[in-house]
Image (spheres, rainbow, N blue to C red):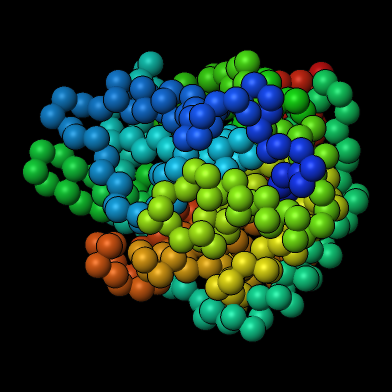
Amino acid sequence: MNASPSHRPHPAEWTETQSLLPSAERDLPAGRHQFHKEQMMARIHEDLRTSSRPSGTSPVAPVKRSNPFLRRTILLPAAAFALAGAVAGGLALTGGGTHGGKTALATGPALTTRFGVADAKGAPQLLERISLAAADTSAPTPRKGQYIYIASKVADSYIKTVGDKSEVVSDELHSRQVWNSLDGRDGWLIEAGKTSDKGITLKGDTPFSGAYNALAGLPTDPDALLQRIYRESDAVRDPEVPRDQAAFVAIGDLLNASYPPAEVGAALYKAAAKIPGVVSVDDAVDATGRHGVAIAREDSGNGERIEWIFDKKTLRFLGERIVVVKATADNPLKVGTVTHTSAITERAVVDANKQLPGQAS
């Protein structure tokens, strides 16, 4: 995979004593909670994809159950992880063409990789060390009026269909920048090839529930945290997706798209250690080519393994990738195909929406 180094990260989840859903959403019938900001972002991206599709080009056909990032609205606790799905996931795969004068991302051959050896016994120890590293309180505490800024590099492999011909292709590695206000009611997204150079607003009446203010009130007890994840995941996940896998995906989303207080992040890693089937991996590579160790879990149904990648020395979160590690009837992709890869290049607190770290207010 092509590389061009960079870095930075964090995680979190929902409270045991309060409902996960804000009061405005609590009265919605079951199944409607996914019409949160993630749905809004998914529709925006689908509009971009549809308007940019050349005539005669069919919509991209996702592999059945092959990429959790394409199915987050039915996999995850919508209130807790809505923007994580929209921003961290591959919701806007383009097949070519232009939008607003912006050329859509070029497609190339499927991304492939070698994958490391999984060790079920090593996961608890590694997660304990990662949790201790995450408990570091040296990161700045955001103040009222500030924004959380997250920059990343991402790419996806997927099935592209034109007429009656289908092939596995990939987006080129591209940049994504997202800003979120602390209350989750305002923000901005710029994604190369998916939005214009100026980006699109994330402002809305329904706050992003993974926002800093919401995360700051969460419990730090790993058991309470995990039970909340399971309960909310069960309410919205695809029945085909195993319960433990949905919980693991949910936690991974927060690693990619949130900035919780250190003690909450530490508790989330401890919660992950309690999910059956979680393993450590001796070597994994993020989207920019940085090698690290990984915490991972395989979905036995589709043979794909989700890997959270950490720096081998500092145990800082680097990124995530999804790799086909086993051939199954449900997944036509070859073993070694990388269906999603990401790398966090910067995570910071800034004073204003669309302001870059280090930039004067």
- The C terminus lies in quadrant: top right
Q: Residue at x 30, y 47 (%)?
A: 62
Is 307 rendered above or below residue 287? below
Measured as percent of width and height from the top left, residue 39 is found at 47, 29
Q: Is residue 145 visible?
A: yes
Report x, y in % for residue 346: 69, 43
Name the residue rendered at 71%, 75% in the picture. 124
**Front in this rendered view, residue 305 or 82:** 82
Q: Is residue 261 above or below residue 301?
A: above
Give the side of residue 122 with respect to residue 104, left or right. Answer: right
Q: Is residue 343 left or right of residue 145?
A: left
Identity of the residue drawn at 36% across and 66% down: 301
User: Where's residue 241, x and y in %?
Assistant: 43, 56
Q: Nearer the viewer, residue 238 or 6?
A: 238
Total numbered labels placed on residues in the image: 0
Q: Is residue 341 left or right of residue 216?
A: left
Q: Residue 282 at x, y = what percent?
A: 59, 78
Left or right of 198 in this view: 105: left
Q: Residue at x 76, y 35 (%)?
A: 214
- Residue 9 visible (yes or no): no
**As displayed, is residue 264 above or below residue 1?**
above
Image quadrant in which the N terminus is located: bottom left
Q: Residue furthest left?
A: 164
